Image (spheres, rainbow, N blue to C red):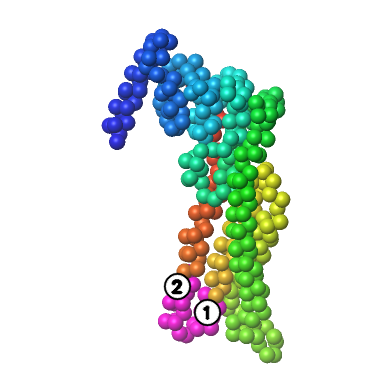
Amino acid sequence: MKLAHFRSHELLCRMRAQISISDTQQREVGRVRDAIVRATKEGNFEFVFEIVKADPQLVWSNDGKSKNIFSVAVQYRQAKIFSLIYGLDIKIALADTRDDFYDNNLLHMAGMLAPSTSLNDIAGAALQMQRELQWFKEVESIATPKARGFVNKEGLTPRQLFTMNHEDMMSKGEKWMKDTASSCTVVGALIVTIMFATAFTVPGGNDQNTGFPIFLNKKLFMVFIVSDALSLFSSSTSVLMFLGILTSRYAEEDFLESLPRKMIIGLSTLFFSIAAMMTAFSAALILMLHEQSWIFKPIICLATIPITLFVSMQFPLLVSMVKSTYGPSIFDRKMKRWF
């Protein structure tokens, strides 16, 4: 694979050298512009970078429906290629250019629905909606106020076009959020109920004379009490977060950070409450059966099964949400001037 990549890169460098000395007619015969547009659609960053570096004017390559490679990159959601625009002094001019068919500028292209192939790797309609909003906000950050309010041939501004094209996705994202929050609310409320009752029915019971728990001076009893309290508080927090999701107004901007943040907090605290509940259960079991060690050991091992199942099912989703909301941006805004 290294050898194949080395040879491909060597061939690409020779192509770049040839293009740098070729004239317009030779490029037309060689279909250079078609190759750049196709590479942009496929997300072949190395090819686009090397060829355009040979002649920066090739950024204006188009497929008849767009004015430059950046509008193609936005349309096909190729973030790495789009980031090349930050290394150009003419990025505002590129953002303001319009196509010949629908009079769409770069921000209009961001308002269109992304190809299904670019969304397949994103789990859940809510995260897909978040990614689409991130794209729109990123392009909007380099667009002029005039470009933001420009009306295309259909009489739509970029924001209106975005809203119209993403109605179905937003509806699916709302349903996904509500279904997930409803299911997790039931689990969280059940844990709250159990852990609240457990705090007043401590293992071993209470001393009839003093009213204090019999195992009060045991270290494991403190582990039980602390775990019970942590489970109660964290599950209560998760229920509140999920209720906040259920009662949200579900505006477009909410999918960008507000709803994912609530879901992240809700899932994190729910996971923590389940782990704390299992810890409290294990501590209580050891306190009551400390003389029968062969009994509680396998039971404690079985107590790890719910935690493992929850992690295997929900933890990948939690990681995806954290990465998408608070992780590194998919755009390289520190792109240096490259020609």
Residue that badge 1 annotates: 285
Q: Is the magenta region chiefly helix, strand or loop? A: helix
Residue that badge 2 annotates: 301
Q: Does 240 sit above or below residue 305?
A: above
Q: Does 337 sit above or below residue 83?
A: above
Left or right for 52, reference 7: right
SS label for mark 1? helix
Residue lying at the far left in this picture: please name it.
Answer: 3
Q: Nearer the viewer, residue 133 or 49?
A: 133
- Asked whether residue 275 is in view, the answer is yes
Please name the residue shown 51% across and 79% down the image. 286
Q: Amino acid at mark 2?
A: Cys
What segment is highlighted magenta in the picture? 282-304
Q: Position of residue 169 (x, y in %)?
A: 59, 46
Q: Nearer the viewer, residue 116 or 189?
A: 116
Q: Quadrant of residue 252?
A: top right
The residues bearing labels 1 and 2 have C-alpha atoms spaced at a distance of 12 Å
